[in-house]
Amino acid sequence: MNPVLVVHGGAVRIVDKDQKEPVRQGIIRAATVGYNILREGGSAVDAVESAVTVLEDDPEFNAGFGSVLNTDGEVEMDASIMNGKDLSAGAVSAVRCVANPIKLARLVMEKTPHCFLTDQGAAKFAAAMGIPEVPGKQLVTERNIKLLEKEKHEKDAQKLDCQKNLGTVGAVALDCRGNVAYATSTGGIVNKMVGRVGDTPCIGSGGYADNDIGAVSTTGHGESVMKVNLARLALFHVEQGKTLEEAADISLGYMKSKLKGLGGVILVSKAGDWAVKWTSASMPWAAVKDGKLHSGIYLDDASITDLP
Ligand SMILES: CC(C)C[C@H](NC(=O)C[C@H](N)C(=O)O)C(=O)O
């Protein structure tokens, strides 16, 4: 089986001119790291975890270091991961002082009898697993302090603003043994209430993976994504015989028509097909298959190159 790796860097985002290149570079770096794991025979779970870790460490994206701030000016992060082989899943929400929430989500999946830990319990578990605590302030970037200030001064703060600098991250993979997996990680939405949990850690909303169908990772307005179970909905349509592109269009279209919710999805099928779709202004993405790297940010700027 030829491995496939797809990553995204969030939806509803107008990438500033001076940010376009670092965003593209970050996405390509993550795709390359993930794909190299698959190429060397590694598992889909390892590949998606590593790709998302690269993006959590990159301040250009709204996950890990670079996460947007809640109304108290703090970082609270959500993440989830799923193994399509046995439907095992792990998630964390409202975690504050870890560098890589996706690694913690994987530990929840593999080292506990549960699939979802939150807030203080997640922090305790992280400490028990020997994950170093990072001071919350270390995750806060100057850009996100400014973004929160701007958001607080805007009258219509609840309205989705396409100028906001956002960038939830996610990955899906198919490995050479035919296993699929997804990972998604986010700082959520700027100026969110303390304790607000979005779609990203919710299995079926932030992502889904089943070897009999494929894998999906989502981004978008969390309150909308959750209400339609966007990831599972997309895979349902694949199960019903739709192509990946059709399934993505139908499920994103449903979210838009029912809730005016915008977002994006990346998908890989068990057969090794892949698709990327969004209803927002843009979505940085990259996909690697057969050594070819496909990437883009807007609708009309997809490019194909050989993987370095
Ligand atoms: C404004 C939104 C649509 C932008 C999008 N945000 C998320 O994906 C947030 C995540 N789904 C949540 O709700 O917690 C982004 O980061 O690109």
Image (cartoon, grey):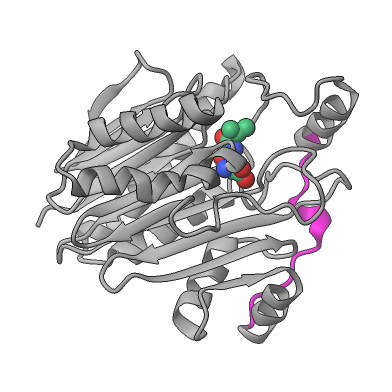
Please tell me whether residue 257 is drawn above or below residue 89 in the rendered image: above
Q: What residue lies at 71% left-to-right and 77% top-to-bottom?
A: 121
Q: Is residue 139 magenta?
A: yes
Image quadrant of residue 209? bottom left
- Position of the C terminus by quadrant: top left
Q: Quadrant of residue 154?
A: top right
Q: Quadrant of the N terminus?
A: bottom left
Position of residue 103 measured from the top left corner of the image (x, y, whole percent): 53, 67
Residue 72 point in image, percent of width and height = 89, 47
Q: Residue at x 68, y 44 (%)?
A: 66
Residue 293 visible in the displayed image: no
- Side of 280 relative to 48 (left or right): right
* Residue 165, percent from left and from top: 66, 28
Q: Seen in the image, is 289 located left or right of residue 45? A: left
* Location of residue 261 with respect to 96 vertically, above or below: above
For image coordinates 68% across by 45% down, the residue present is: 67
Ligand 1 quarter of the rendering: top right
Q: Nearer the viewer, residue 202 or 299?
A: 202
Q: Which residues lie in the magenta part?
A: 130-142
**Does the rendering let one see residue 174?**
yes
Q: Main secondary structure of the magenta part?
A: loop
